[in-house]
Image (cartoon, rainbow, N blue to C red):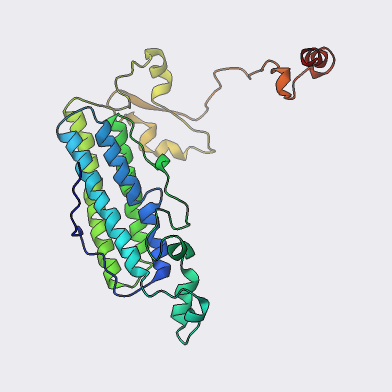
Amino acid sequence: MFSHIKDLQFEAKPDGPDAAFANRLQEILGGKWGEMTVANQYLYQGWNCRLPGKYKDLLLDVGTEEMGHVEMIATMITRLLENAPLALSEAAGDNPMVGAIYSGSNPAHFIHGGGGALPTDSNGVPWNGAYVTASGNLMADFQLNVTAEAQGRLQVSRLFNMTDDPGVKQMLRFLLARDTMHQNMWMAAIEQLKEDGLEEMPVPDAFPDSKEFNKEFSYTYLDFSPGQDAAEGRWASGPTPDGKGEFRYDHSPRAHAPEPVLPPGDPRLYGTNPGLAGGVATKVKSKMT
């Protein structure tokens, strides 16, 4: 059960309007790695979590916080759209900056949103629930969450260099700080899963891997590039991060099965098959008549 608090987690107030930057800010609201994605992702992971206690609380707590970030960014976008020119005649005055802002604005902000934020990315592509992953395996989900926070922080960092507005920059600084915490938090949660004996690498740890395949395939790096530069990497020799094997390096990977030869397809699907003429074609006609 949620309770909405009217105060924002952090101030979301620009020093002035900027409809063009409002459109860019849509990316961290409704983009693939935006706040709408992580908020829903963490909440669904929490709702699907079968472990009562700290892990479920962690997911639902941070998912709730991210909903607050959705509200902050939506508020900032709405404020950036205040007093924006709605027609070319308004933008074509003596101030060339106003014209530039008009040309970079998103018409949907005014036509669809009435001067407010939209559940879309910076290209106007609607937010999609397919962006959300909640697998039920906490190790898999927590690793993805680290990536989500890294991608989100990367995009906020890029946006920081696309505006000169002090108020916008201050909100972005706050989001960058929280993304720092969240990256560290998910990495700590991964270690906690290991310490609690709940999950290990590789995911899923509980699957009974074949000892026969483990020996040849599970820890072998296959090099398909010219030269042997990849052999210098940590992934080509030494103990594996899961602590269960040693990396091997193979510069000349070999095939383990012959070239596949497929049987003719169902003639009623009209694919290009060997021996389609003659008897096969007659067989098709007989089935159709």
Q: Is residue 113 depicted above or below 280 in this figure?
A: below
In the foreground, 92 or 234: 92
Q: Where is residue 52? Give x, y as percent.
A: 17, 30
In the foreground, 65 or 189: 65
Quadrant location of the N terminus in the rendered image: top left
| Residue 184 shows up from this direction | no
Horizontal placement of 66 versus 158: left or right? left
Q: Where is residue 189? Give x, y as percent.
A: 21, 37
Q: Residue at x 37, y 40 (%)?
A: 132
Q: Where is residue 28? Give x, y as percent.
A: 36, 55
Q: Where is residue 153? Give x, y as percent.
A: 32, 53
Q: Residue at x 41, y 64 (%)?
A: 114
Q: Residue at x 24, y 41 (%)?
A: 186
Find residue 79 and report its image quarter: bottom left
Give the number of marks: 0
Q: Is residue 12 depicted above or below 200 in this figure?
A: below
Residue that sits furthest to the right in the current view: 278
